[in-house]
């Protein structure tokens, strides 16, 4: 369990010294949804800037996931290509066939059929 908190401060109180209950930071978990709240139960809405930053963070995470998936696909494809070349060169070993099956199952999992990994 993460102990990170949002720590956002109420607009207008974020640049002042932390005196009084209005200057207490948000104690909800980091990246929470909805309004901010402090330990006293005071609530304040999420600002437009915070919403924009959250959307930007979500887009960035989606981009990174897509990039990682693409790079993983390229890596598996290179390995498979080497295995296929060895197979056509005359290597008919059981280990090579098993490796090809595992790599093809990984590609199928990346395409959205993870049940192939269990086979």
Image (cartoon, rainbow, N blue to C red):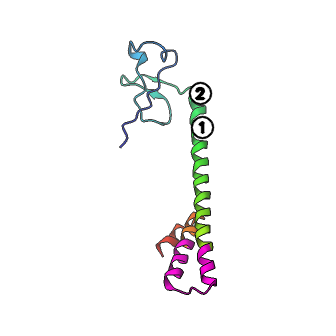
Q: Secondary structure at mark 2?
A: helix
Badge 1: few (under 14), some or many (20 or more) residues near its Cα, within 10 Å? Answer: few
Residue at 63% x, 84% y: name it. Answer: 89
Q: Under tag 1, what secondary structure?
A: helix
Specify whether 43 is left or right of 110.
left
| Residue at the extreme front | 89
Residue 5: which numbered mark, if any? none
Residue 55 disc label: 1
Q: Who's the residue at 56% across and 25% down the image?
A: 47
Q: Distance of mark 1 from mark 2, alpha carbons?
A: 10 Å
Q: Are circles 1 and 2 on residues that touch, CB within 8 Å?
A: no
Residue depicted at 62% across the width and 58% down the height: 70
Task: Between residue 11 and residue 103, name the one nearer to us.
Answer: 103
Which residue is denoted by mark 2 in the rendering?
49
Pick the residue in front: 79 or 66: 79
The quadrant the N terminus occupies is top left
Q: Callout 2 environment at 10 Å: few (<14), some (14 to 19), or many (20+)?
A: few
Q: Which residues are magenta?
A: 82-104
Name the residue at 46% across, 12% down.
16
Q: Position of residue 85 (x, y in %)?
A: 63, 78
Sequence-wise, which precedes: disc 1 or disc 2?
A: 2
Q: Is residue 100 magenta?
A: yes
How far across and down, in percent of the image, does residue 110 sit? 57, 63
Instruction: Say above or below: 114 vs 119.
Output: above
């Amino acid at each position: 369990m993460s102990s990170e908190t949002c720590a956002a401060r109420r607009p207008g109180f974020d640049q002042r010294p932390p005196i009084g209950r209005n200057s207490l930071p948000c104690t909800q978990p980091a990246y929470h949804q909805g309004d901010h709240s402090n330990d006293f139960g005071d609530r304040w809405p999420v600002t437009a800037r915070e919403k924009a930053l959250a959307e930007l963070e979500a887009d960035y995470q989606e981009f990174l996931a897509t990039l990682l998936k693409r790079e993983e696909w390229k890596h598996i494809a290179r390995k498979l290509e080497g295995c296929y070349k060895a197979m056509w060169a005359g290597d008919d070993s059981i280990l090579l066939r098993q490796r090809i099956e595992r790599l093809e199952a990984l590609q199928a999992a990346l395409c959205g059929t993870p049940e192939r990994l269990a086979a």
